[in-house]
Image (tube, helix red, strand yellow):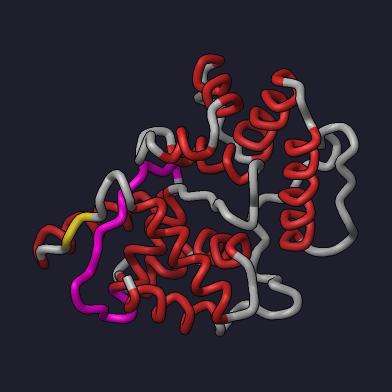
Amino acid sequence: MVQLQHAITEYAEQFIDETNDWYSWRTINEDILPEGVVLPEGNQYLKNIALKSQLNQKWQASSSDEERADLTKYYISDWGGIKTNGSASLAEYSTKSAEELVLKGKKGIASWSKAIVLHDPNKYAIFDARVAISLNCIQIVRDLPNKLLFPILSSRNNTIGLGNQLVKSKAKQEGWSRADESSFYSEYLTILTKVAKELNSDVSTVEMLLFAKAEELVKQAFPQV
């Protein structure tokens, strides 16, 4: 994990700066923001950081299960674009504690990790298909010894989908260790926290970089893509 942490730090310091214009994924629809949320002028990075902060403030200030359910649904479905969760899953994501949701492991992580970012964006971070492929591919790009296979999550993005297949094949051929189902998310957070500290940044920014650079890292790891 220390080697991966150093690899991500060296990679991230090439990009993290005052503007972070590398984050341009999906323009936030400001017409459907939760009531009271007002985003600043600026790029999508600044808007997303402000969005997390304001949603967290609303979450912490709310004592209403209904309001917290609305915030969770907004961040998972409207902002995050995940429309496949049923009402029972969304209810679980909005009522359980962060600690309880982390215990779910890989199951539903692209959704529940968004939910717990609302609890504390300085402590928790999203883990989805793009982040997962970046964690796996950066180990290939940096030729790390003792590679660790993070859970591979399905994606509708063709580059990420192909990258998933290539990573699986390479990991099998080279005998990578598999990340522990019960602890990989906590280890991921530890890495983000240490990288952020090294770069005088924050976990959200490091996570957003891994998310934004996913396709680029796939192509660096597998030039044939």
- Please name the predominant secondary structure of the magenta segment in the image: loop
Q: Percent position (x, y) of residue 24?
A: 67, 61
Q: Percent position (x, y) of residue 104?
A: 38, 34
Quarter of the picture holding the C terminus: bottom left
Q: Which residue appears at 58% of the width and 55% of the height?
A: 123
Question: In this picture, is 106 found above or below 192?
Answer: above
Q: Which residue appears at 61% of the width and 40% of the height?
A: 80
Quarter of the picture holding the N terminus: bottom left
Q: Is residue 1 left or right of residue 186?
A: left
Q: Which residue appears at 55% of the width and 53% of the height?
A: 125
Q: Percent position (x, y) of residue 36?
A: 90, 37
Q: Percent position (x, y) of residue 157?
A: 45, 48
Q: Is residue 52 left or right of residue 214?
A: right
- Reply yes or no: does residue 195 show up in magenta: no
Q: Which residues are magenta?
A: 140-156
- Reply yes or no: does residue 153 show up in magenta: yes
